[in-house]
Image (spheres, rainbow, N blue to C red):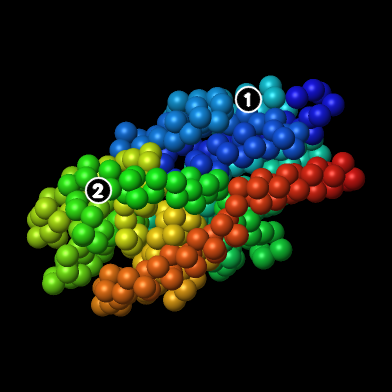
Amino acid sequence: MTEDQKRGRVTRVIARLNVGGPAIQAITLTKELERFGYVTRLVRGVEDPAEGTMDYLAEQLGVAPTLVSSMRRDPSFGDLMALLRLVALMRRDRPKVVHTHAAKGGTLGRLATVLAFPLPSRRPVLIHTYHGHSLTGYFSARKARFYTLVERILATQTDVLLAVSSEVRDDLIGLGVAPASRLRVMPLGFDLSPFTDDTDREARRLALRKLWGLSDGELVVTLIARLVPIKRVDRFLDAAVSVARGRKVRFVVVGDGELGEELKASSQAKTLAERLVWAGFRRDIPDVCFASDVVMLTSDNEGTPVSLIEAQAAAVPVVATDVGGTRSVVLDGESGLLSPPGDSAALVAALGRLLDDPSLRRRMGDAGRSHVTTEFTLDRLVSDHASLYDELLASRHGR
């Protein structure tokens, strides 16, 4: 790219490239915005050992992130070192746009921008994306109030706040983080072609089922999630125990995390015994979806559940708790079934209904593929971001 083709330098900050939607978006935007003239430095911290990493995606796309080794998930004295490093990077690069992602990256990245450029007139355009939020359901009431106050203060210094779904936006408004006029909804987008490519689908389905010790005659229900409290894997196991009675069905958990050992030793896991497969982190998620008859997600909160987008792109129906941005992803009654998070009977009934009706699974699978491949495309996500950057930079120059 020549100097004349460049529209501006972007600094993108994310605390860690752990497995999940925020890391996928940060990496893909870093690469894909090049064709719109935006050259990006992706700044990342370090994942916890049990979180998994999306480094392989960065390698595939030729993205080389800048590592700030003291930037990690949990608060520590290392945050001060990370902040100083970010300030130094900002002052050296003098980006036109700083775009931060998720809680820790948003806090340190935005604070570093304000410190590096104290005069607002000389400050880069500052954008933050909420891929969900941790202001409810994660911390004690006292900590939640403190973190909410931090978000309110940082919001006053941010040019645009992006939410990945209308539900996340409404939550933030309700919590007083910012008024509606400061928040925009920008849904996620992905390269879904690996999930819509049905070439050798049956062979890939059978190969993975064989690896897991499953026969083709068995129904398979899969949960794809980090094994952390907010994902409520225990709720999935409870539903599995109930649904397993009288049905030829097996259950697969794809993912790992801090609760891994505890969940594997749980009474539900022991009851399911050989009917439950712990698959760990996997990169072949299209094949995971192909090998599944239903994909579930049983979280207490979600921003935009990527696993449900990917499952639907693979034409697999889904069952999920109706929380956060899930309703923006799943067409309830058309591409999947949603149930209230506290209603275990409804969750079991929804799963049982899909397992017992092959034609319903096919119809919902087809509807899901049509829905997500229209609403959650990578081209739309990238062009939306390029247009936003263009708009904000033009406004800044106008001022």
Q: Identity of the amino acid at label 2?
A: Arg
Local secondary structure at mark 1? helix
Q: Residue at x 37, y 52 (%)?
A: 289
Dot 1 or dot 2: first in sequence order is: 1
Q: Residue at x 67, y 59 (%)?
A: 184
Depth check, mark 1 against mark 2: the one in front is 2
| Between 226 and 357, the one nearer to me in the picture | 357
- 148 lies above or below 122: below
**Image coords of residue 96 (percent x, y):** 75, 35
- 26 lies above or below 374: above
Q: Identity of the amino acid at label 1?
A: Leu
From this viewpoint, is residue 232 visible? no
Residue designated by label 2: 209
Relative placement, left or right, of 243 versus 319 is: left
Tell me the quarter of the image containing the N terminus.
top right
Residue 372 quadrant: bottom right
**Image coords of residue 100 (percent x, y):** 59, 42
Residue 225: numbered disc: none
**Image coords of residue 265 (percent x, y):** 12, 50
Circle 1 Cα neighbour tier, 10 Å, few/some/many (<14 / 14–19 / ≥20): some
From this viewpoint, is residue 295 visible? yes
Local secondary structure at mark 2? helix
Tell me the quarter of the image containing the C terminus.
top right
Q: Residue at x 33, y 46 (%)?
A: 203
Relative placement, left or right, of 268 versus 159 is: left
| Between 199 and 120, the one nearer to me in the picture | 199
The image shows a total of numbered marks equal to 2
Residue designated by label 1: 89
Q: Residue at x 40, y 35 (%)?
A: 53
- Kindly report the distance in space between the C-alpha atoms of the residues bearing marks 1 and 2: 47 Å
Circle 2 Cα neighbour tier, 10 Å, few/some/many (<14 / 14–19 / ≥20): many
- 247 lies above or below 384: below
